Image (spheres, rainbow, N blue to C red):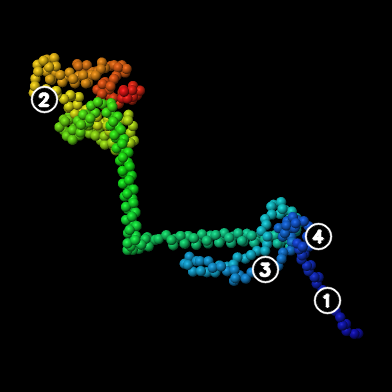
Amino acid sequence: MSTPTTIEVVVPEAAPEPAKLPAREDLQAQGWSAKELESAEKRGMLATKPEVKIDAQKEEKETPKADGVLTPEPAKKVSTLPDFEMTPEQLKVFETTFGKGTAPRAMYYRMKNERQSRQAAEAKARELEARLKAVEDAKTTPTPEEQADFEDQPLTIKALKVMQLQEQQAIDKAQRENQERTSVVVAAQNEQEAYAKTIYTDYDQTVGLAKEVITDLDLHIPEKRDQTRVLRLVRELQVAAANADKLGLDDDHSAMIAYEIGKFHPKYGKTPAPKGEETGSKDPKANGGLTAEQMKRIEANNLRRGSSAAIPAGGGKRTISVDDVDMATLNAMTYTERKSFRDTHPEKYARLVRG
């Protein structure tokens, strides 16, 4: 029996080759429209061109570290996968069309994972950039020690001249503002004084008495109660004079307050003695045979009375009609009475003071 020269062996079945994706040119030759080709390319259903490898060493970029030393930055890996995200409806159709193990399905999930990795890398890069910026900002802000060293540095002539120029400019600006303010206040004071003179015919004389009262309060006003009132008016006078431009003609401005102070003087309301009395000449027939003292009392009563609405010679007060109030009655009022009359009857007051 001869020995067999051949044997049978089991040949394994060849693994099926993976399905190849059609190229864009092939589908275009088959009549696919441009829109269909674009949609298929977005979904990764077309064969892509060979990936071009980029030398990472050539793409390295130098980025500054916090200490100023330049270090190479790894080159970003360029992806050949399209940046595409399906809607839930599109994903459902896609997974139904391409089952598990198919190339389009694997490519889609590879693309999705790569996009997530890229987003994480970009977030990390932004965080690193923010840290570098914080370090640079910290460098530009001087520490207390650095600030102290800067202040201890010698002052140059140029810097000294700049400082002197700035100081002089600030002084000049303040002086101009003060001069402008003073001019406005003085103009307002003059207007208020002129207005007061139209109301009080004895304004100049009474203000002169006010100056005497302020100069020597104890001599002209012995009563402590009146002294307290005068001191309060003096303080109001100072405030009103400094803010004259903020007060109207009918407000309690400095001209009106000065007149009120003068009314505390013992000589207020008294007329000067006749010239004949000053020289010592006496005429028994002059003034109807009345003495000088009697004439003074009569004139003082006339000044205080001025109209039928004035206080009678016997003293006291009586009620009169508002229509009977005239300029003489208004002048005979105290500061408080006149202010109350102005607040109660503003129209009547305005007609009187404006003639």
Which mark is first along the chain, 1 or 4?
1
Viewer-proximal residue among 185 and 33: 185
Horizontal relation, residue 301 to residue 82: left or right: left
Residue 278: which disc? 2
Q: Which residue is drawn at 33% across and 32% down?
A: 248
Q: Residues within 10 Å of mark 3 (few under 14, many from 20)?
A: few
Q: Which residue is the site of mark 3?
A: 52
Helix, strand or loop at mark 4: loop
Kind of residue sitting beneath label 3: Val
Q: Which residue is the site of mark 1?
A: 9
* Total numbered labels placed on residues in the image: 4
Which mark is first along the chain, 1 or 3?
1
| Position above or below: 266 against 127 | above
Horizontal relation, residue 215 to residue 124: left or right: left
Which mark is first along the chain, 4 or 2?
4
Instruction: Compute the Cα span from label 2 to label 1.
Output: 166 Å
Q: Which residue is the site of mark 4?
A: 30
Which-is-in-front pick, marks 3 and 1? 3
